Amino acid sequence: MKRNLLILLAAMLLACTLSAQETEMPRLRHNSITTSPTTFLGDAFLLTYEHTLPHHSSLEVELGGQGFRWNEWHASNLGPATRPGCVATLGYKIYLANGAKNRAIANAGGLPPLSFFVKGRLSFVHQWSTYDVPRGNEGWNLITERYTFHENDLSLALIFGEQFVTKHGFVAAPFFGFCIPLWIDGPYHNISNPGNSAAFWGMTTWGVKLGWAF
């Protein structure tokens, strides 16, 4: 956890440093496409599309996959891996723009060059695993049958972060949040132990989104 916080603090310091170098009024950008490289640590990928709304806010839609190397990783010492699955999220973000330039751009419906934000997010995860289940034996030969078990997870998250957009459109947004499992239907996890996915890591979600605004 300390390492994760250090990564986020370093990213926020970089954003503030770059912001101090921005002197020109950038053009309005209403959309962005980003991804968080930190999801790769969990053998997952999540792509985010953001579209601004009036009144310092935006909508975010995320789609991704996970567990690409589950068969190699789940029995190793590399730590818990995500199971094969797909992820979709829907988020509503409120920008807390600081400074006249940032507020003017947010008021005009654009992505502010530098702003703190608060986001509520609803996540859906569908995941599965395939196992060889013993069905009997013929002498010394064990007979197995392959079964695939599925699970559906629904959760809410409250996320805090800082987003920086350069005049050329590069986006950097470190974030950290807390997840609340709402419903879990499957054999792998429960409300008190939601597991890991492309959208969350246990009861938390964190990372640094990188991409481009347009």
Image: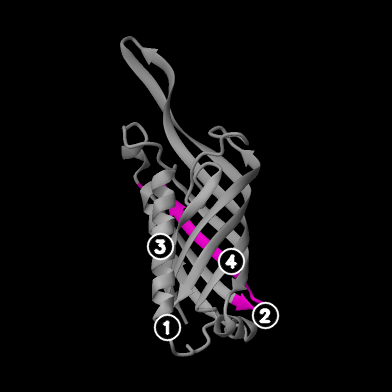
Seen at 44% across and 51% down, the residue is: 5
Residue at which label 2 appears: 54
Q: Nearer the viewer, residue 174 or 83?
A: 174
In reply to whether residue 62 is colored magenta, the answer given is yes
- Residue density around tag 2, few if under 14, some if 14–19, many if 20 or more, within 10 Å: few
Q: Which residues are magenta?
A: 52-68
Q: Position of residue 103 (x, y in %)?
A: 61, 81
- What is the spatial separation of the Cα atoms under label 2 and label 4, in whole angstroms? 15 Å
Q: Position of residue 177 (x, y in %)?
A: 56, 52
Depth-wise, is mark 2 or mark 1 nearer the camera?
Answer: 1
Seen at 62% across and 54% down, the residue is: 158
Q: Position of residue 66 (x, y in %)?
A: 43, 50
Q: Nearer the viewer, residue 90 or 114?
A: 114
Where residue 22 is drawn, which disc sits there? 1
Hey, what amino acid is under mark 2? Pro
Mark found first going from the N terminus, 4 or 1: 1
Mark found first going from the N terminus, 3 or 4: 3
Per the picture, the main secondary structure of the magenta-coloured stretch is: strand
